[in-house]
Amino acid sequence: MAWDFSTEPEFQKKLDWVADFCENEIEPLDLVFPYAVRSKDPKIKALVDPLKQQVKDQGLWALFLDEELGGPGFGQLKLALINEILGKYGSAPAIFGTAAPDTGNMEMLAAYGTEEQKERWLYPLMNQEIWSAYSMTEPQGGSDPNLFKTTAVKDGDEWVINGEKWFTSAGRAADILFVMCTNGMFVVPRDTPGVEIQPFPSTHNHIIYKDVRVPLDHLLGPEDGAKVLAQRRLGGGRIHHAMRTIAQCKKAFDMMCERALSRESHGKIIAEHQMVQEAIADSYAEINMLRLLVLWTAWTIDNSSTQEARRQIAACKYTMAKVLKEVSFRALHIMGSLGTTNLTPLQAMYAGAPTMGLADGADEVHKVTVARSVLKDYRPHEGLWPTEYIPAKRAKAREKYADLFASDPDLLKYADAMEKYMASRGH
Ligand SMILES: Cc1cc2nc3c(=O)[nH]c(=O)nc-3n(C[C@H](O)[C@H](O)[C@H](O)COP(=O)(O)OP(=O)(O)OC[C@H]3O[C@@H](n4cnc5c(N)ncnc54)[C@H](O)[C@@H]3O)c2cc1C
């Protein structure tokens, strides 16, 4: 029987190690030295690098990459189980070498880079010796790639890029930028003249590319291949976000349950009030629905490809924001006034829900993808009646018994009586 929801004992040991390491090493670092993972200060690096080394020693570095690319080659299902832990801790993805936006960019490089491009950018990215960002969205609109205008023009042995990008996450800190142009995907070192990072927004950057010149070999993949590369990049990224969102939902749920058992009101522990129980029961079911959807999608990717799992990935994408919104809202509410402060992570989690609905594409666009793809499996019915129209189905079923009715009038009478009885009951 292939439908098995158990975890191999050997892998469970890895999961236990990850949970323990995150709780006892990463969480204290996050609380006392926030943003340490991105610091270039040697004293801070001396705190972070040994943690990364421990992850490498466990064979858990760059989890999302196949073995031949230097990752452990666990596949997406195992990655999902690990991300369900990492997603609870701000800097855990970076300490495990699985942080966005680098992961998606590495996937693109791994799939489309030449050997020389991999040497130059992929391996340093894998070792986190350099950082990257992804410049796709433009100020005039992100949901519709047909509105993008940034272009590269060949001039001798260089490409000259002109355009404007919006919401390039961590662009300011990146060493290289993956710039989606109308005619291809380009790798642009951030310090190239003409890369102008605007002061706002501070984290997700507005970047003007003005006569930016890069050598011809900075084109990644084929000319005009930008949309294909973008799909490859974003498909993986979306499912990874969904895996980490499960972690956020579980964390909110744990906080909700702990609090429900700890507070008293109107003569009872609040967990004994039915509306609180409803919040817990609904959250439990919704988290597990999301989790099963994500794990099934991860399994599908492992057994086919990201492309084959496109419909499922899109469904994960818009479901995660919805579940995070519902569960974090309920947890925040049950926490009472404390939940509305920034003294617990719940405020940030709840604020994160709309972000998840937009990052990697607005949910509506993914719903369109799912609906269109699902409808390809259906055909319109012939004639006036839907396939499940009972009178038509019954008439057809009676044809099957025509010989029997001809040979046994009692059975015909019985069938007629039953038809009348069913009609009287509205069937
Ligand atoms: C935290 C975060 C990080 C991000 N990081 C990056 C990054 O690193 N690089 C990058 O390039 N981009 C990044 N983005 C941008 C992201 O890809 C865009 O926000 C997204 O594609 C939507 O584009 P937009 O913001 O221009 O909204 P619009 O395209 O203007 O859409 C606004 C709204 O219009 C509606 N809408 C749009 N299209 C449809 C439709 N077809 N059907 C129904 N309704 C529709 C939806 O309600 C949608 O939310 C990031 C976004 C966030 C929030």
Image (cartoon, rainbow, N blue to C red):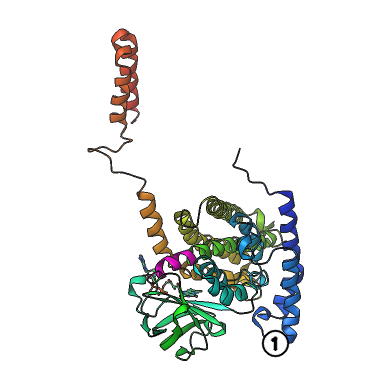
Q: Nearer the viewer, residue 93 or 66?
A: 66
Q: Which image quarter: residue 59?
A: bottom right
Q: Which range is magenta?
A: 224-233
Looking at the image, can residue 341 be seen? no
Q: Report if residue 3 lies within the magenta region.
A: no
Q: Quadrant of ligand 1?
A: bottom left
- The spot of residue 70 in percent (x, y) is 64, 65
- The spot of residue 66 in percent (x, y) is 60, 60
What's the residue at 56%, 83% (across, down)? 175
Residue extending farthest to the left is: 383
Looking at the image, can residue 273 be seen? yes
The residue that mark 1 highlights is 41
Q: Main secondary structure of the magenta part?
A: helix
- Residue 267 appears left or right of 151: right
Image position of 273 with respect to 357: above or below: above
Image position of 178 with respect to 245: above or below: below
